[in-house]
Image (spheres, helix red, strand yellow):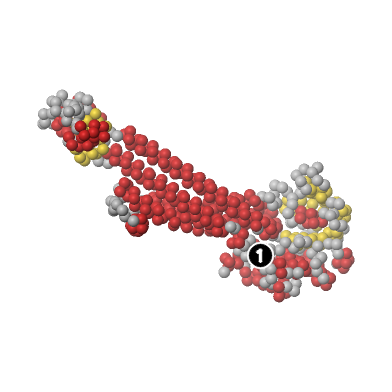
């Protein structure tokens, strides 16, 4: 369950320092829900996803992520444990430059101290599904934008997260690949993962109809 | 194999931390600590021995030694010096009594009187009393001596012992201060190296944090590497310190009473080093020194681990 009540976030410590980025955001998404996050550039989509990923904490308001109240007084260990249940696909992919594709994908499972045999199976399945088998030993710097994006997607979904946040996850992919990725995210949602996908791709939104969150100038205008 | 795979998290700390400079700096700090510690142990050992010696040796001065004693209940002799010697012989805790003869008095007073000699001077008789370790000359006995021979002076050397203890304590304090200072500088160097490593892996640490790695995990990764390098540095510094420490221990041996001196004038440094190392290997060094030196790599490791933990955890506070 994701629940936000009157959440505000802005740069700087005080409200009058700089322009507010998110204002009085309230939303509720049940477990297993799928939501498109739509809005023009600069509307605050990435900021809202960062907030839900707890890369930033609300300046005011209440935020509940996966049944846990989040605030500035939340324990760091609690936040770390929660992040292990959240998959995040960043626009800039954020891959480990020193690791191969396979090791990048395996990283969340290694942090959870899973058995290497189990990790290997999961990684191989995702490499195969995303067409990255031949690139498994390549470093991120050797990959194309599409390959990096697919690697980031694989890393986000490998531990079957309870919440998946995707910031423009298909902008470097071909249409057919993009449709496959969104199809997979919908399947994850059907299996119980809450999925929020920020996108500009209207074709995909129309092809995979789902409730949408509309952000404009830091305000949430619709929850359906 | 599993251990190798567990650390495939992208931090690649063997390339992130300034390994060589950190190792060299820690080795230099450990060398300084080892030498300072050795000096402290040596100073303490010497002062203890000298203080013990001073406490065991008492000097008794008897004026007008050839006069008749005032009372003579303990001796059969007819002079005050014979009466005093007789009384001292009955006391417990005395190992040896020795009355200085004229030649010995001449030698003792030569710095003040030159070659003139003491024959013309009305000097008191001087008796050296060697006590058993921990032995004392009772106040009653001293009182008896002054009764037999008025003006008899008993010098117990307590002032000397007290001064030696003060000197020893001061030396130990200075050594402790120097070790603490070197340790603090070492911690600062380790801290800076850790900050450098964090700076070069800022992106990777942030990604790990976002993937749910706890502060403890990241801090442990850095601390393990820093502790490993600190241990190697500590070990290297301690090993490098051993030859000079062995020589120092060998040179100090005659003064601290561990082994008799085997040094010959004009002996080459190489042969001194060889003899020193052999003696060191055969256990000439005090046990407290060996234990202390053995602890240095581990203490330095602990400092490295703790410093890295603190630096990394503080740095991670900037991330939510």
Image coordinates for residue B39, horizontal then vertical, percent? 40, 47
Position of the N terminus of chain B, as image quadrant, is: bottom right
For residue B220, side relative to residue B281 (left or right): right
- Vertical relation: A198 (above or below) A129: above
Q: Mark 1 lies on which chain?
A: A
Asked if B69 appears above or below B317 in the picture, the reply is above
Count of picture labels: 1
Whether residue A218 appears in this view of the structure is: yes
**Residue A119 position by quadrant:** bottom right
Q: Position of residue B181 (x, y in %)?
A: 50, 45
- Residue B271 lies in what quarter of the image? bottom left
- Residue appearing at x 28%, y 51% in the figure: B260
Q: Nearer the viewer, residue A222 or B31?
A: B31
Residue A112 visible at all: no
Q: Where is residue B288 in the image (x, y as percent from the top left)?
A: 39, 50
Query: Which element type, helix, strand or loop, lies under badge 1?
Result: loop
Which residue is located at x 33 percent, y 33 percent?
B159
Instruction: Answer above or below: position of B154 versus B52.
Output: above
Residue under the image location 33 percent in, 36 percent down: B161
**In the displayed structure, does residue A45 sit left or right of residue A101?**
right
Residue B166 horizontal side relative to residue B3, left or right? left
- For this rendering, which residue is in front, A14 or A138? A138
Q: How crowded is mark 1: few (under 14 residues within 10 Å), some or many (20 or more)?
A: some
Q: Position of residue B92 (x, y in %)?
A: 21, 37
Q: In the image, A147: left or right of B99?
A: right
- Residue at the far front: name it: B115
Between B177 and B269, which is closer to the camera in this rendering?
B269
Give the residue pinned by disc 1: A98
């Amino acid at each position: 369950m994701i629940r936000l009540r009157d959440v505000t976030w802005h740069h700087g410590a005080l409200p009058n320092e700089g322009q507010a980025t998110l204002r009085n955001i309230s939303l509720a998404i049940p477990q297993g829900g799928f939501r498109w996050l739509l809005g023009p550039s600069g509307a605050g989509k990435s900021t809202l996803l960062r907030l839900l990923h707890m890369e930033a904490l609300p300046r005011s308001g209440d935020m509940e992520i996966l049944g846990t109240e989040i605030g500035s007084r939340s324990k760091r260990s609690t936040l770390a444990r929660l992040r292990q249940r959240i998959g995040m696909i960043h626009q800039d992919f954020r891959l480990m430059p020193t690791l191969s594709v396979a090791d990048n994908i395996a990283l969340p499972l290694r942090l959870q101290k899973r058995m290497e045999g189990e990790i290997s199976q999961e990684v191989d399945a995702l490499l195969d599904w995303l067409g990255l088998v031949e690139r498994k030993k390549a470093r991120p710097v050797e990959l194309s934008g599409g390959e990096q994006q697919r690697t980031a997607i694989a890393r986000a979904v490998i531990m079957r997260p309870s919440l998946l946040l995707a910031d423009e996850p298909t902008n470097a992919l071909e249409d057919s690949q993009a449709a496959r990725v969104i199809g997979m995210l919908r399947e994850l949602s059907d299996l119980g993962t809450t999925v929020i996908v920020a996108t500009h791709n209207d074709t995909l939104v129309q092809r995979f109809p789902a409730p949408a969150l509309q952000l404009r100038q830091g305000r949430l205008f619709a929850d359906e | 194999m599993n251990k190798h795979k567990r650390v495939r998290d992208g931090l690649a700390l063997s390339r992130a931390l300034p390994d060589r400079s950190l190792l060299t700096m820690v080795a230099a700090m450990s060398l300084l600590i080892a030498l300072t510690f050795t000096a402290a142990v040596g100073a303490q050992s010497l002062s203890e021995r000298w203080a013990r010696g001073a406490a065991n040796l008492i000097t008794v001065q008897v004026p007008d030694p050839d006069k008749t004693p005032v009372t003579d209940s303990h001796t059969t002799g007819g002079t005050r010096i014979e009466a005093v010697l007789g009384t001292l012989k009955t006391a417990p805790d005395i190992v040896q009594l020795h009355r200085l003869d004229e030649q010995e008095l001449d030698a003792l007073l030569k710095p003040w009187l030159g070659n003139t000699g003491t024959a013309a001077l009305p000097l008191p008789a001087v008796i050296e009393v060697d006590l058993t370790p921990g032995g004392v000359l009772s106040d009653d006995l001293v009182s008896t001596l002054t009764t037999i021979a008025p003006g008899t002076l008993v010098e117990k050397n307590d002032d000397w012992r007290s001064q030696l203890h003060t000197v020893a304590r001061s030396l130990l304090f200075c050594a402790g201060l120097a070790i603490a200072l070197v340790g603090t500088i070492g911690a600062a160097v380790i801290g800076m190296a850790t900050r450098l490593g964090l700076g070069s892996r800022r992106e990777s640490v942030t990604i790990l944090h976002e993937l749910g790695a706890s502060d403890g995990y990241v801090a442990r990764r850095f601390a393990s590497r820093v502790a490993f390098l600190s241990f190697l540095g500590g070990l290297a510094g301690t090993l490098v310190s051993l030859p000079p420490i062995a020589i120092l221990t060998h040179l100090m041996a005659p003064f601290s009473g561990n082994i008799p001196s085997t040094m010959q004038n004009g002996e080459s440094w190489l042969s001194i080093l060889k003899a020193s190392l052999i003696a060191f290997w055969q256990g000439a060094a005090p046990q407290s020194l060996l234990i202390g030196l053995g602890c240095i790599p581990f203490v330095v490791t602990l400092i490295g681990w703790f410093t890295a933990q603190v630096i990394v955890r503080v740095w991670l506070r900037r991330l939510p």
